[in-house]
Amino acid sequence: MKLNTLLATLAASAVLAFTAPVTQAFADDDPGPAAYEAAMKGKRVALVPLAMGFDLAQGWAAILKREVEAFGGTLETRDPNWSTEAGAQAITELISSENKPDVLIVMAFDLNSYSKLLKKAQAEGIYVILIDNPANFKADAYVGGDWTKLGMLEAEAVIKGCGDKSSKKIGLVQGDEVNATSLYQYAGIMKVLEQHKDYQVVAKPDSNWDATTSRNVTATMLQQNPDICGIIDFWDGDATGAAAAIRDAGKQDQIFLVTTGGGEETNTCANVANGTFDAVVSTELYNESEAMVAMIKYLLQSGQPPGTASPYIYTLMNTVTKDNLNPRSCWSLKGLQAAAEAK
Amino acid sequence: MAGGSTHGLWSQERIVLALAVALFAVAAIFLPGFRDIGNLISIVHSVSVLGLLAVGMAIVIIGRGIDLSAVAIMAMSAAWYLQLLNDGWSEWQALGATGAGVLAIGLVNGFLVAYADVPAIFATLATGSFVFGFVRSRLITQDAVPVPPGNWLEQLSGLHPLGIPPEVFIFGGACFLAYLFLRFTKWGRYVYYMGDNLLAARNMGIPVRPMNLLRYVISAFIALIAGLLTASSLHSMNTRIVNSTLLYDIILVVVIGGIGLSGGKGGMRNVIVGAILIGIMQNAMTIIDIPNLYQNLIKATILLIAIVIDSLVNPRDEQTAQQGDI
């Protein structure tokens, strides 16, 4: 009996002695995938942009979906359809739902509306990533454009477009008086114009992001200052209105129209090619989306509690003009959606 | 005044007209460039689509009712039309489909009000949301739909006979046609009778239910034209306009012009006066560079003043008090 046990023990240890180094070798291989899977699998990511109906939001959603599903997570989107109330409701519902998201990606309407809600989300253990629109809130990351820089790029484009021999009179069509994108854009433009004292802003009405309003205020602006050489409209969604007013006045050749947009083919490049816009400072969608993805992956594996750090991950912007227009200037929503469907 | 108003010398229309003239005079004296012919054209241009929508709204309101779906129909019908063109439909197919859709919504509005006895304010609020939601989620892929290059809408916006944009002519034409309709056709007179006293109109043998259908269908088609004009001018249709204050601005034009929400009074003159007042105000405020928030405040204050003066000068009588508004 005793001998049997001894033999069995010996045999077992012999087996162990042979096999143990082998399993050790497997584990040594790469601890990454297991750790990655443990941290990421089944994680829920929720995207709440201003609306799902515009180019950037659809681009982000397509790229995020591919990435999130690749690590075994799920991506949910909510469509507030340009309503702050609907957006707040969507976030509230996400925070209090049984299956809370692990990462909340939010595009804020203005500096303050969401601040309390997002703090609450962090208190519930949800990482919050702010995208594209800054807000007064310490997010786990801000990913998107530096709007002051964007305004500076626009001002530089309009100065270049006007040229030294022009009237050096510029008109601004601002968005509104509460949105950070509008306020910071204005600050950036003014920063550059301070360096160019000979340039003068002759009017700066608001469009409320509405194309018809943009058209009407631009028409009035051109009536008052027929010798304007450049206009900066704060968003390509309403800059079609400013473009219409310029067209109505027959001044396409005289006025250099600058705006900003998502860099999507049909909105940005087509309108630059056909002369609706003269320059568009646009977002590099792929870089911006990949920065979001990297932050999601980092935060989920970091083990840090939400709200630990709030870095700004500014993405580069690209000024598209007729002169530098090339096949890589824009991204294609159709192409992105077709690629997603093909999978 | 058309519709047999009982108003005296200082009807709201005249108060508003006086206000508009006063504003115009002040602006013409103090604001540089305001009197320029180009600026006057751009004032009328800026309120042409608004005024056109107000024509449709006026026809509905005069006959006692309200159409809160007008802006949704305007934006979504034009957007769907453009989407169909972009998807490769032929001009006539796209126009036919859009026209059929607009007719259907007008009929549903009229049916809900006339036959199902749903108050107009709720019926049209619901159909407006439905139209927006359905078209946005099922029929178009993005908020903004561009006009295909070379389309007739693009060419239309390039036409400026006498230096005047096409919207101005269409607004003027619509006012004239609506004036002829309301003033000289029996259907037009029925609209006033119904607005003045629905039960009496019904007892007289006026076909009040088909008339309701007709009014909402007219309003829906005017909205379609307004949408096409907007798309023509901007070379795209952005459906975000449904969330804007445009709907309130339309009602503002109608009410400020002196067409009471209780129905039965007013005409196209009121629409024109209301639209011009709004146009002058917005133009002057843009020239002075007043921020948007204050512009809304000023617009609202002027509306309140007009309403208060109206209720002081023209106190409500027994009949309107019993009937209530809308």
Image (tube, coloured by chain):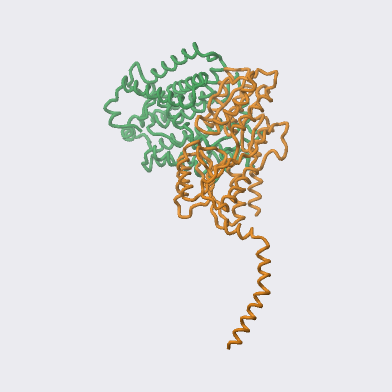
Chain colours: A orange, B green
The reply, left or right, for residue B311 in relation to residue A108 is: left
Quadrant in which residue A141 is drawn: top right
Front residue (pair B94, A5): A5
Q: Residue furthest bottom?
A: A1
Let me know if residue B180 appears in the view: no
Q: Position of residue B184 (x, y in %)?
A: 43, 25
Let me know if residue A130 appears in the view: yes
Q: Position of residue A86 (x, y in %)?
A: 46, 42
In this rendering, is residue B63 above or below A12? Answer: above
Q: Position of residue A332 (x, y in %)?
A: 66, 43
**Residue located 38% across and 18% down the image:** B15
Front residue (pair B121, A36): A36
Q: Residue furthest left?
A: B318
**Residue located 47% across and 35% down the image:** B70
**Residue located 66% across and 69% down the image:** A23
Q: Position of residue B74 (x, y in %)?
A: 51, 35
State which quarter of the image contains the N terminus of chain B.
Answer: top left
Front residue (pair A118, A3): A3
The reply, left or right, for residue B63 in relation to residue B40 is: left
Quadrant in which residue B111 is drawn: top left
Q: How many numbered discs sit on the rendered protein?
A: 0
The reply, left or right, for residue A316 in relation to residue A99 is: right
Front residue (pair A254, A162): A162
State which quarter of the image contains the C terminus of chain B.
Answer: top left
Quadrant in which residue B37 is drawn: top right
